[in-house]
Image: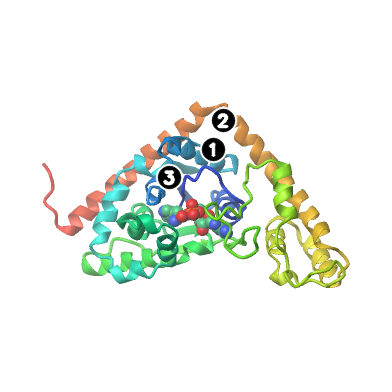
Amino acid sequence: MKRIFSGIQPTGEIHLGNYVGAIRNWAYLQDDYDCIFCVVDYHAITIEYPVEEMKRRTLDTAIILLACGLTPERSKIFVQSHVPEHTELAWIFNTVTPIGEVERMTQFKDKARQHRANINMGLMDYPVLQAADILLYKAGYVPVGEDQVQHIELCREVARKFNTRFTPIFPEPEELLSMAPRILGVDGQSKMSKSLGNYIGVLEEDDVVWEKLRTAVTDVNRVRRKDPGNPEVCNIYTIHRAFSDNAMLIEIDRGCTSAGIGCIDCKKMLFENVKRELTPVREKARELEKNMDYVVDVLEKGADACREIAHATMEEVRATLGLYPPR
Ligand code: TYM
């Protein structure tokens, strides 16, 4: 069975972009692949964060993954810092990664702009650690949103550089995009993201979700109710595509382009579908919160299984590098 690896940062709150761009897809993929999913806490410390909240955010993120349908029977789910080989392999990869390649990463440039007071080495090294995450398990596929595609390209480059300089032991992994790889925020302009505050949280209450949807930007050229709209440039329609069936999409397309339905009607339909899909996720999350022993157990077992694979890869890597082994 082909192996999949993907990761998510413990920001504590997961938004609709993470959900339809990645996590929901992970849940589908579990039946067909050997899956490893990781809460990447070492990536999260590359920007300022509240130290006292990190433990809670890590557990909350694991809860959401389980609530969205990941199961320990089908996937290994664990916390990155519980398997130290991730950072060990990242160091080795640093020695084959050209600085120019990491400097041109869009995410690095964006983050460097956003966090001017702390442009640290970790921020720059972020995609190298990401390559180590994936290649430590020799994963062939990486299900991510569109914003991560450049990092997966770099991962292939790192694998290629290592393989040609030493011995070819790593695959060149490919990204797997979901059907909604790029969801914009409620501002209709930038990628939905927690840091920009333009997000709708998966666990947010219905009234909060509705308020955010109600005021979300649609086709900016549709000024009056009687103006026809263009679904192709409307972020609400993009989100509809991820939550609504074909019949409804056709109904909206016809209604919007003929001004038969207004944006609020369209948003109400979307709200109902989001609610139908996320209500069970929220219920499951609440249940899991009362059963933290189970959540911790899942993470422990996941880390145990991953440590074994990671250990074997590192033995192979050290031998490949010609390092002097301990007795
Ligand atoms: P993170 O935590 O930012 O996001 C988790 C996943 O959600 C996707 N995503 C989106 N998809 C569609 N529309 C959006 N607006 C949107 N926002 C986020 C992301 O593409 C991602 O798949 N660097 C990674 C974490 C990581 C990783 C890895 C991923 C670390 N190591 C190894 C894959 C393999 C990240 O920051 O994800």
Quarter occupied by residue 245: bottom right
Q: Residues within 10 Å of mark 2 (few under 14, many from 20)?
A: some
Q: Secondary structure at mark 1?
A: helix
Q: Which residue is mark 2?
A: 289
Closest to the observer, 2 or 292: 292
Compared with residue 321, is residue 204 higher up or lower down, i.e. above or below?
above
Q: Which residue is mark 3?
A: 49
Q: Residues within 10 Å of mark 1 (few under 14, many from 20)?
A: many
Furthest residue in direction front, as rendered: 117
One can see residue 320 in this view? yes
Q: Position of residue 167 (x, y in %)?
A: 23, 64
Q: Earlier in the sequence, mark 3 or mark 2?
A: 3
Identify the disc placed on residue 114. Answer: none
Q: Position of residue 12 (x, y in %)?
A: 52, 42
Q: Earlier in the sequence, mark 3 or mark 1?
A: 3
Closest to the observer, 29 or 147: 147
Q: Secondary structure at mark 3?
A: loop
Which amino acid is tagged 1? Ile
Which amino acid is tagged 2? Glu
Q: Are marks 2 and 1 in contact (CB under 8 Å)?
A: yes
Residue at the spot x=41%, y=66% of the render?
Answer: 109
Q: Position of residue 161 (x, y in %)?
A: 28, 68
Q: Which residue is mark 1?
A: 63
Residue at the spot x=26%, y=60% of the render?
Answer: 94
Q: Secondary structure at mark 2?
A: helix
> Mark 1: is the Cβ under 8 angstroms from ligand 1?
no
